[in-house]
Image: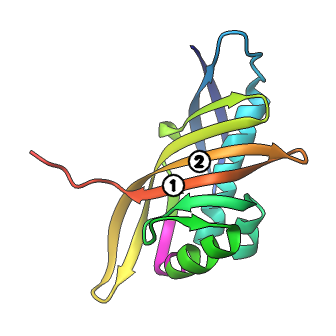
Amino acid sequence: MHKHPMSHTGDCRDGTLVCVVECVVAVREGTVFLGSETANQIHQWLTNFAQAVREVDFEAGRELFAGDVISFGTVNEMLEGLDTLQSKQWQNVWGKTRGFEFDYASIRCGIDGNNGWAIALWSSQGRNAKGWFERHGRSTFIFEKREGHWVAVHSHLSLAPAPTL
């Protein structure tokens, strides 16, 4: 497996910040590298998902996922189908979240034809009975290109493990 580093510079959230994204694309022997445009599409997918979470925009989130998605979430073990993902995970979490963002420098992704994957660290604030608190986590997404658009067929978001000594 070869790794092809790619850089992407673009506007973050409000358009005033510039982010430099390193996306390491894994390319198997014999697989044609699809180019930076495809990796940028994966990066844009992550940007759009983060925005949907921040804005508690379920419809925008749904457009990014396959109807037959299977997910692991921060408050549920396994969720099958987009309706279940929205009702059991998103509706229980997004409204108690602010500032959700991926650590774009941590993104690693791979593309092989109409299949892709991405992992990234994320951070946000969560709210409980005591108020707002910082939280950090990690995410994995598996994508399929359907009808010309990347959709997640699997997602796994989890809180970062507590450090151990």
Outermost residue on the top side: it is 30
Task: Please state which amino acid type lies under the numbered disc 2.
Answer: Phe
Q: Which residues are magenta?
A: 93-99
Give the class, few, some or many, for how many residues have Cα within 10 Å of label 2's Cα (few <14, many ≥20). many
Q: Secondary structure at mark 2?
A: strand
What is the spatial separation of the Cα atoms under label 1 and label 2, in whole angstroms? 7 Å
Where is residue 84 shown, x and y percent of the image? 63, 74
Q: Could you tell which of marks 1 and 2 lies nearer the N-terminus?
A: 2
Image position of 55 (left or right of 96): right
Task: Please state which amino acid type lies under the numbered disc 1.
Answer: His
Where is residue 7 shown, x and y percent of the image? 63, 27
Rendered view: 157 above or below 24: below
Q: Residue at x 52, y 42 (%)?
A: 119
Residue bearing mark 1? 156
Name the image quarter holding residue 36.
top right
Q: Secondary structure at mark 1?
A: strand
Q: Quadrant of the N terminus?
A: top right
Choose between 78 and 7: the one closer to the eye.
78
Name the image quarter holding residue 54.
bottom right
Rendered view: 46 above or below 26: below
Residue bearing mark 2? 141
